[in-house]
Image (cartoon, grey):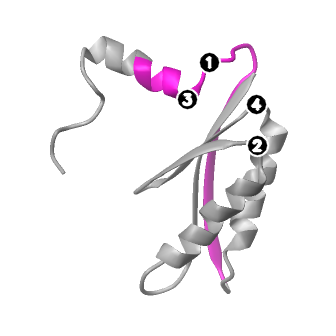
Amino acid sequence: MTAVALLSVAPVKEGSMAADVADAVAALEDFDVCYETNPMGTVIEADDVGTLFAACEAAHRAVEADRVSTVLKIDDKRTSDASAAAKVEGVETVLGRPARSDRE
């Protein structure tokens, strides 16, 4: 089984949140998960949903602010071991190219 999540953790405040987001991402290192951060959140992959929830809770708690906003979306693939990368590869196979633009 593979559990994949999109996690967004941020303090509710004015100004840069980079240091707070970095704290949340750093908290993931204490768990047996793979992750990749992008501009909209962090994609996390774990062997089971319990590990995924624990990692997400740690990331949420790592942000020290009066108010923290966390959004979590989970795909718990209970009958498959396909990875998050396999999902992207499937889309790229259909597209016949990488699933991204050449613009930066």
Q: Earlier in the sequence, mark 1 or mark 2?
A: 2
Q: Which residues are magenta?
A: 67-89
Q: Are marks 3 and 4 in contact (CB under 8 Å)?
A: no
Q: Which residue is mark 4?
A: 47
Name which quarter of the figure residue 49 lies in.
Answer: top right
Q: Residues within 10 Å of mark 4 (few under 14, many from 20)?
A: some
Is 102 on the left-hand or right-hand side of 14?
Answer: left
Name which quarter of the figure residue 11 lies in.
Answer: bottom right
- Tell me the tag on residue 10: none
Is 79 on the left-hand or right-hand side of 38?
Answer: right
- Tell me the tag on residue 82: 1
Q: Residues within 10 Å of mark 1 (few under 14, many from 20)?
A: few
Tell me the amino acid under the disc marked 3: Ala
The residue located at (43%, 26%) in the rendering is 88
Observer-nearest of 59 and 75 = 59
Work out which residue is located at the far right of the displayed protein and give it.
50
- Element carrying mark 2: loop
Q: Residues within 10 Å of mark 2 (few under 14, many from 20)?
A: some
Task: Judge whether residue 10 can be spotted in this image.
Answer: no
Q: Which residue is mark 3?
A: 84
Q: Earlier in the sequence, mark 2 or mark 3?
A: 2
Inter-mark Cα distance, 3 to 4: 11 Å
Inter-mark Cα distance, 1 to 2: 17 Å
Residue 86 part of the magenta segment: yes
Tell me the amino acid under the disc marked 2: Asp
The residue located at (30%, 29%) in the rendering is 99
- Element carrying mark 1: loop
Q: Which residue is mark 2?
A: 32
Q: Is residue 22 above or below residue 15?
A: above
